[in-house]
Amino acid sequence: MCERFTVSAALITLIVLGVTVALFVWDRLPVMVVALCVPVALWATGVLDLGEAFGGFGDPTIIFIASLFVVSEALDAAGVTTWVGGVALRLAGESRVRLVVVILVLVALVTAVITPNGSVAALTPVVVVLAIRAKRSPSELLLPLAFGAHAGSLLMLTGSPVNLVIADYAEAAGVGPFGLFAFAIAGVPLVLITMIIVVLLGPRLIPHRSPGRSLRDLGAQAALLTEHYALGEDDALRLSRGVGVIEAVIPPRSAFVGDRVHPGMPTESGRIVIRAVQHKGEDVQSGHALHAGDTLLLQGAWEDLAEAAQDPDILVVDDPEQIRRQTVPLGVGARRTLVILGVMILLLATNLVPAAIAGLLAAMAVIVTRVLSVRQVYAGIGWTTVILVGGLMSLSTAMVKSGAAEQLADALVRVVGNAGPYALLAVLFVVTAALGQLISNMATAFIVVPVGLAAAAEMGVSPAPVLMAIAVFAAAALLTPVATPANLVVMEAAGYRFGDYWKLGAVLIVAYGLVGIFLVPLIWTF
């Protein structure tokens, strides 16, 4: 009876696995819905009890991943990302080679701290500006940005949620947790290889496209508005840590229609000043009764402008929070954020506390020091990723408990035969790389890791090189735009098509395979 239940549970788990992969590939349901269906299905079919099915949501890895999102949001909100982008603008110039090198180094370093999706989202506007100033198409530089992020995710433990999951499995498997910089042994060579390949082969492998819509570059917003409203040099707008500007339009049926205004007058609150008024595109210099369609230039403290932007009686052209983040490098809270980041990295590097505690302390410090509000913290967390990880942990648990992982491992070992552990890594590379182009690399890791661990146990080899190799293989999500959110972010900004990724990606994915199969076992021996 026990044997029949094991086989039956394993079959159910494999069916759930197959349906999950199919739903991810079908891409008609939200990712988080699919992820939440997994523990529900495993509980409903009796494969897992309720605690096991939803135990992933209480895992310390979930806490650490959410904490990293908070720290990432703090770096962006405090203007640290903007400052880093400004440094890149000064260093890059117009040389294609210099642009590529600066972008790849920059995105790799940023990704090591805030993950590929966060770094690519933050740096895409910076790279677009770099391309425009160098008189190049953004499509020449945005694909290297995304691919550089994948390589950079292997520089530190914090570089990717996959790394955290792999480190968690390593500790559970008895090989000890991978340290903060353990992944850099694979990450540094991959960053350098990516750089060399993009420099040498980029012009032939990266397509030239035109984006469907241009991204807003708010970096020169002050100069643009000064010119648009003809304020003159003496009255030119100057944005700072404390003071900003927004442009607002009076909509139809606004309560402000008919109010008399003039440049220089304060608003009713007394905290915001009307710097300029335009009616039908013409500047108004004296008292004017507002009409629908009139535009106002408002200046005041950033927090007051953010509050004014919520007024339904005006339409704000650009969100003041976005203007501040793009125009004020190292703004309010930047020093506090960098100190918090430094302490978190120190705690992770020294293993003084578990990773989840280090991340949680950093996230709480960001709130207590008022770098972010609670509302900003909630908005900054990538809930899709958090739910994806928590939900799919149940699938990994079920594969081990039901024996499905062991059965797949048996089949894998039979395929490998007597070819040895290197052949095992080669097969794992093919499976991981194939799945990783269709579903998220996080989902791929949860599917492949239990199989890889079971296969390593059957072959009598250490799980350490297998786990580290899977981390490398999972990062090679380079052939399609749907492989990771980072790939999708640059797709719209550059105007790429679905088939534009595979040429450069195919060359790079071979490098990931070679590093995972041959370099990793040199450090973590079988």
Image (cartoon, grey):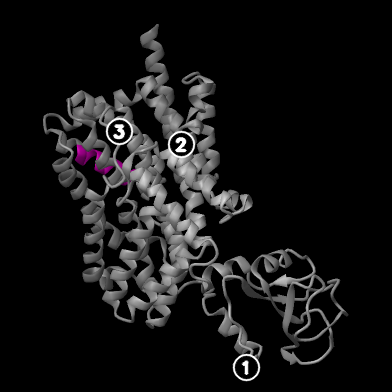
| Among the two numbered marks 3 and 1 on one chain, the one whose residue lies closer to the N terminus | 3
Of tags 2 and 3, the one toward the viewer is 3
**Residue 339 location in percent, x, y?**
44, 55
Say whether residue 352 is magenta: no
Asked whether, in this view, residue 258 is left or right of residue 171, the answer is: right
Residue shown at 13% from the left, 42% from the top: 522
Give whichever of 150, 490 is nearer the camera.
Answer: 150
Q: Which residue is mark 3?
A: 170
- Quick check: can you spot residue 107? yes
Q: Which residue is mark 1?
A: 232
Residue shown at 53% from the left, 67% from the top: 331
**Badge number at residue 471:** none
Asked whether, in this view, residue 461 is left or right of residue 352, the answer is: left
Of tags 3 and 1, the one toward the viewer is 1
Residue reaching furthest top?
1
Near mark 1 (Cα within 10 A), the count class, few <14, some 14-19 or many ≥20, is: few
Asked whether, in this view, residue 196 is left or right of residue 482, the answer is: left
Mark 3 vs mark 1, CA separation in Å: 63 Å
Q: Magenta: predominant secondary structure element?
A: helix
**Residue 521 location in percent, x, y?**
16, 40
Near mark 3 (Cα within 10 A), the count class, few <14, some 14-19 or many ≥20, is: many
> Do the residues under discs 1 and 2 have CB atoms within 8 angstroms?
no
**Residue 512 location in percent, x, y?**
24, 51
Q: Which residue is mark 2?
A: 20
Give whichever of 94, 113 is nearer the camera.
Answer: 113
Secondary structure at badge 2 equals: helix
Say whether residue 432 is magenta: yes
For the record, the magenta segment spans: 425-435
Amino acid at dot 1: Gly
Secondary structure at badge 1 equals: loop
Of tags 1 and 2, the one toward the viewer is 1
| Among the two numbered marks 2 and 3 on one chain, the one whose residue lies closer to the N terminus | 2
